[in-house]
Image (cartoon, rainbow, N blue to C red):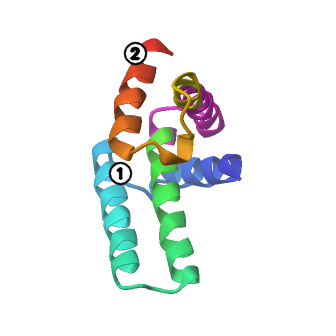
């Protein structure tokens, strides 16, 4: 699906039916994030939330296209990074003999910073 979105965004960019710069695209992306937040705040329907979330993803893909980034590759890199960091958190909890689900968020955030520096 990401490839389909990239193709459509690139077609729109190439045809001139898009924002002029990546900065303009960032502004539009922020607008879409704000609309998603408003939909959440107003307890909109699941379908409405899905639509707004999709708009956020779609405008972010526009930014990636403008920067000639492969969305699939970028997402794969992010997933691998987060899997390594999350694994670090679980390992840390295990080493301390604690159930991961009982570790306070504040502690997890400290460990997350450690993971960012060590993994």
x, y percent for residue 86: 56, 32
Say whether residue 103 is magenta. Answer: no
- Relative to 118, is 84 on the left or the right? right
The tag on residue 117 is 2
Image position, residue 27 (x, y; %): 28, 55
Question: Helix, strand or loop at disc 2?
Answer: helix
Q: Is residue 53 above or below residue 69?
A: below
What secondary structure characterizes most of the magenta part? helix
Q: Residue at x 34, y 30 (%)?
A: 110
Label 1 sits on residue: 25
Secondary structure under tag 1 reads helix
**Which residues are drawn in magenta?**
65-87
Closest to the camera, between mark 1 and mark 2, is 2
The quadrant where residue 87 appears: top right
Q: Earlier in the sequence, mark 1 or mark 2?
A: 1
Label 1 to label 2, Cα distance in Å? 31 Å
């Amino acid at each position: 699906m990401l490839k389909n979105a990239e193709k459509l965004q690139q077609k729109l960019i190439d045809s001139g039916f898009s924002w002029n710069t990546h900065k303009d695209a960032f502004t539009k992306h922020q607008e879409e994030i704000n609309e998603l937040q408003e939909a959440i705040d107003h307890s909109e329907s699941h379908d409405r939330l899905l639509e707004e979330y999709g708009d956020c993803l779609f405008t972010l893909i526009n930014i990636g296209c403008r920067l000639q980034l492969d969305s699939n590759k970028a997402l794969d890199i992010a997933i691998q990074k987060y899997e390594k960091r999350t694994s670090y958190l679980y390992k840390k909890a295990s080493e301390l003999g604690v159930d991961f689900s009982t570790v306070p968020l504040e502690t997890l955030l400290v460990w997350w910073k450690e993971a960012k520096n060590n993994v």
